[in-house]
Amino acid sequence: MRGPLPGILFALLAFALFSTHDVVVKTLGGTYAPFQVIFFSVLFSFPITTVVLMRDATAGTLLPVHPKWVIARTIAAVLASICAFYAFSVLPLADAYAIMFASPLLITLLAIPVLGERVRLRRGLAIVVGLSGIIVVLQPGQAELTLGHLAALVSAICGAFASVVVRRIGREERSVVLLLYPMVANFLVMGLMLPVVYEPMPVADLGKVALIALLAFCAMSCIILAYRHAEAALIAPMQYSQILWALIFGALLFGEIPSGTTLIGAGIVIASGLYIVFRESRAGVSDNTPVLRSRSRVGTPAALRIGPILRLRGVIR
């Protein structure tokens, strides 16, 4: 196959794998605390990570060039992981995705103070409309808002911030620094919490945690292949295919039937996100194209960040 179609198919496969990853997280989340699930998923991913990082022949140390930004990004990544895993554990899949889909809108918003991005009227209106979709999903005053809803929103905010920081410092920091610091931080923080929340895990559940790490790696690999075959403007919208998997998995596995307001709100958020993606793909609209250059998915601690991996393999510069 020629043209962008292979890239689009790889992206669709990647987000199908990510959705399967989230289903496994949800099944484990009913029994174990997010700290425990994240700890073991990161532990199982370390061998894969080591092999990937061995490809980095860049001279230098693991000391960051911009320590404050690296620390801020690492904290944001850890919070995004905890909140995402908790949200998937307690919320219907469609609700969690609908809120986390706000990440491109938040990336555009955070790019103003962090990157000095100028957001003109049309993209500004798209942000306002998209965030109103989140309000439709949450239904403040009509539906009960839970910690799960808050966790999903915090995950989206922290994930967006981490992505924008990578855009700011990515060209000057070694890829290995950007890849390793969040994983090690997740491992250490979750390890410190483990004695407080630990529940014995049978072999079958340990196998599910290993499956989380495997699915994250396979999805990451598919994303890399997608960017080798198609432009970012075609790959980025494919993340919204996860709402279809949420409807299928939610109904078949968990008996979840999303409300009409959830679907309407998700539709508003998706439409706004697509508008921003296509606006950024036009020359002269954005100096930084922060959304198109933010390739990693929110709250997947067992997966390496996509952008640094693409630089490491020479797919992008």
Image: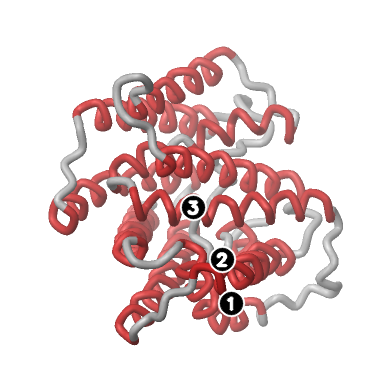
Q: Amino acid at mark 2?
A: Leu
Q: Position of residue 230 (x, y in %)?
A: 45, 52
Q: Which mark is residue 65?
A: none
Q: Vertically, is 96 above or below 121?
A: below
Q: Is residue 161 visible?
A: yes
Q: Secondary structure at mark 1?
A: helix
Give the residue pinned by disc 1. 49
Marks 3 and 2 in Cβ contact (< 8 Å): no
- Ranked by sequence position, the earlier of labels 3 and 2 is 3
Q: Which residue is mark 3?
A: 297
Residue in view at x 43 percent, y 41 percent: 147
Residue at the spot x=44%, y=56% of the render? 85
Q: Do we see residue 2 in this rendering?
A: no
- CB within 8 Å, label 1 to label 2: yes
Dot 2 corresponds to which residue? 304
Q: Rounded to the nearest whole Å, what is the CA distance between mark 1 and mark 2?
A: 7 Å
